[in-house]
Amino acid sequence: MRLESLDSRALAAVRFLDGETEQPLTPPLAVSGDGVRVVRNRWGLYVITEAPGLEDYTARFEAPPEPGPAPRSFTLSVVDPSGRHLPRSFSLELPLGVEDAVFEPVDVRMYLAPTARPSPGSAVVRLSLTNEQNAPLAARRVLRLRVDLLDKPAIKGLGLSDERGEALLLVPRIPIIRWGHEQGESLSHRIFSATLESALAPSVAGLPDPDVPDQSFTPLPLTLQVASGLETNRRIPIPTS
């Protein structure tokens, strides 16, 4: 995607976040939508400059039409060429209705592929989702992991299963105990309990849209033990009826 300067009215700007660190992604992504034009600017934001039915609004920067156009929902898809994140779709209401929409980007989370390499110190949870017949669950599910800490607010991690039912959740910033400061002394990993919830990710334009509301999540009857830098693997049946 080319970097361009903009001299017309923008409809919105999108900032994509890494599924592990929740920091803005800097490597280029492939973002597209039916009739929607997306331009990546020098700050790594993906600016939507054109959309069907909004041509008059985007063409006149200093004197937009009055009254302004009614917001319409548009679906976009995003693919990470590096393969670290799973492809996904997301929806936006355009125009956003704020004059400086480009300076208030919409954050979109990218979910890690099962093959993504974790950062040092993150708790690693690998899940294999199955149906009642113990076959891999093809339907995409959003997984939410809650790690309860003793003296701090709980930490949450999010994951998305792929078409094989495989999901990866990486949870950074879990505390570690060091028993001393002498050279050669090892770290002691504190073990924490974690609970799981899942929700069905609807398919939009052939790709999952993981932005599901909180009320869509249901608890899974499983408690995990997680720690910084350690990996946990589980096979989990998901009721489908």
Image (cartoon, helix red, strand yellow):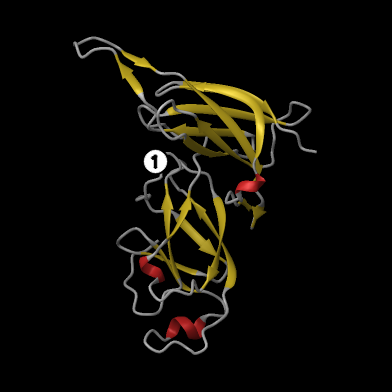
Q: Residues within 10 Å of mark 1 (few under 14, many from 20)?
A: some
What residue appears at the point 40 percent right and 61 percent down from the top-left corner?
A: 1
Amino acid bearing label 1: Thr
> In terms of secondary structure, where does tag 1 sit?
loop
The image quadrant that residue 40 belongs to is bottom left
Report which residue position mark 1 lands on. 21
> Height in image: 54 above or below 146?
below
The image quadrant that residue 62 belongs to is bottom left
Rendering coords of residue 82 (x, y %): 43, 44
> Height in image: 26 above or below 55?
above
> Height in image: 57 above or below 221?
below
Rendering coords of residue 109 (x, y %): 48, 49
What residue appears at the point 57 percent right and 29 percent down from the top-left corner?
A: 195
Rendering coords of residue 222 (x, y %): 63, 25
What residue appears at the point 73 percent right and 29 percent down from the top-left corner?
A: 135
Rendering coords of residue 196 (x, y %): 59, 32
> Height in image: 94 above or below 228?
below
